[in-house]
Image (spheres, rainbow, N blue to C red):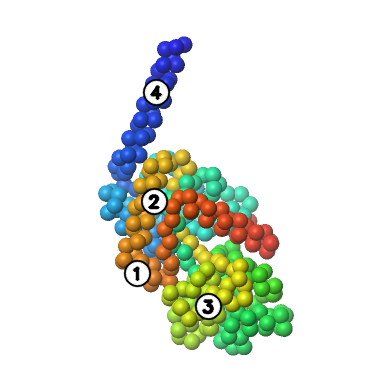
């Protein structure tokens, strides 16, 4: 019995030593970042930009692998079931880690328990735009118009359960107005109908709305971030415009499978934060009207929990479901 116990303890010590060594030497082979969205889209482009910079500090190739499907859930499930060794990471999104947990009745993974946060990467403020024929030029005027003209406002989005949809739900709840949601299959047809006057307002990404605002095809009333966007510094936030508690952004970050060694998480975090701080990455993010973040794993974990709580309440209050 003692001999069995001795070899059992010896095996545990060897395993711990091997784990420590692997964490110390990490990485010794390519690292893969799974993107739960289609190739060529904004999420994929951002991930590739980050990966290219991480290679230099990690000393190994960093490969970006698109795995779209099931509302971003497919890619997230793949990573949740991967070995917790730091070699397979997820480019987490607002959907995978803040929205889908409530939006879907059942997920094949737990966004909190099955992942170890590494770092927030970037946040994407949205823009509130209205049809040019609508006689409002501020959020205050929009809210007043809605209350004086019930039934005359329809709100578009690029899809049910998206951050654009939920940003609108948060707005109508805080403003206490009625503006029924009309989902479209993507932002392009929704914006076309907004310009055509078939719908009156919409929340959408700044990279798609800014050219239309600059071209005089729609009118911008506010941005959804906590502070004004450097891309459009003259446009106020919703918080400045009479809704002090309003903040809504899309975001992306890096998470690893739960159980990944802390030393590996630390190395990955340092590499990500260094990549985000590089001038060319900052410039590339600025061209996308995105705001570089970078955070500690602990800060990102807190952020995810707050976002999950906020969007969970919004989804339940609006009775939204993807099933």
- Residue 136: image quadrant is bottom right
Residue 101 location in percent, x, y?
Answer: 59, 53
Q: Is residue 59 above or below residue 209?
A: above
Q: Which residue is mark 1?
A: 283
> Upstream in the sequence, badge 2 or badge 4?
4
Residue 86 location in percent, x, y?
Answer: 39, 44
Q: Is residue 233 above or below residue 258?
A: below
Cα–Cα gap, marks 2 and 3: 33 Å
Q: Which mark is residue 11?
A: 4
Q: Is residue 9 above or below residue 182?
A: above
**Badge 3: residue crowd in 10 Å (few <14, some 14–19, many ≥20):** many
Depth check: 99 or 298 in front?
A: 298
Residue 31 location in percent, x, y?
Answer: 34, 48
Does dot 3 land on a helix, a strand or a loop?
loop
Q: Which mark is residue 269?
A: 2
Residue 39 showing in the rendered view: no
Does dot 4 land on a helix, a strand or a loop?
helix
């Amino acid at each position: 019995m003692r001999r069995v116990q001795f070899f059992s303890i010896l095996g545990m010590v060897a395993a711990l030593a091997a784990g420590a060594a692997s964490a110390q030497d990490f990485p010794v082979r390519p690292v893969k970042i799974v993107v739960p969205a289609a190739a060529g889209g904004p999420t994929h482009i951002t991930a590739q930009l980050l990966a290219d910079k991480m290679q230099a500090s990690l000393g190994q190739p960093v490969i970006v692998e698109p795995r779209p499907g099931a509302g971003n859930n497919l890619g997230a499930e793949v990573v949740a079931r991967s070995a917790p060794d730091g070699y397979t990471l997820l480019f987490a999104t607002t959907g995978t880690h803040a929205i889908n947990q409530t939006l879907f009745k059942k997920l094949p993974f737990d966004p909190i328990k099955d992942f170890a946060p590494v770092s927030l990467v970037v946040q994407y403020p949205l823009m509130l735009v209205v049809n040019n024929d609508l006689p409002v030029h501020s959020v205050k005027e929009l809210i007043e118009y809605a209350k004086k003209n019930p039934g005359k406002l329809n709100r578009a989005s690029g899809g049910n359960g998206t951050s654009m949809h939920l940003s609108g739900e948060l707005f109508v709840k805080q403003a206490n107005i009625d503006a029924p949601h009309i989902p479209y299959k993507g932002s392009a047809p929704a914006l076309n109908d907004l310009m055509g006057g078939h719908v009156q307002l919409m929340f959408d990404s700044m990279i798609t709305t800014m050219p239309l605002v600059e071209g005089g095809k729609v009118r911008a009333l506010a941005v959804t971030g906590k502070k004004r966007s450097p891309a459009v510094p003259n446009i106020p936030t919703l918080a400045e415009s009479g809704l002090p508690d309003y903040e809504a952004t899309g975001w992306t970050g890096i998470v690893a499978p739960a159980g990944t060694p802390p030393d590996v998480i630390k190395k990955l975090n340092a590499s990500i934060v260094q990549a985000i701080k590089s001038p060319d990455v900052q410039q590339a993010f600025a061209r996308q009207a995105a705001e570089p973040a970078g955070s500690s794993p602990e800060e990102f974990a807190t952020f995810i929990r707050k976002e999950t709580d906020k969007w969970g309440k919004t989804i339940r209050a609006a009775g939204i479901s993807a099933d």
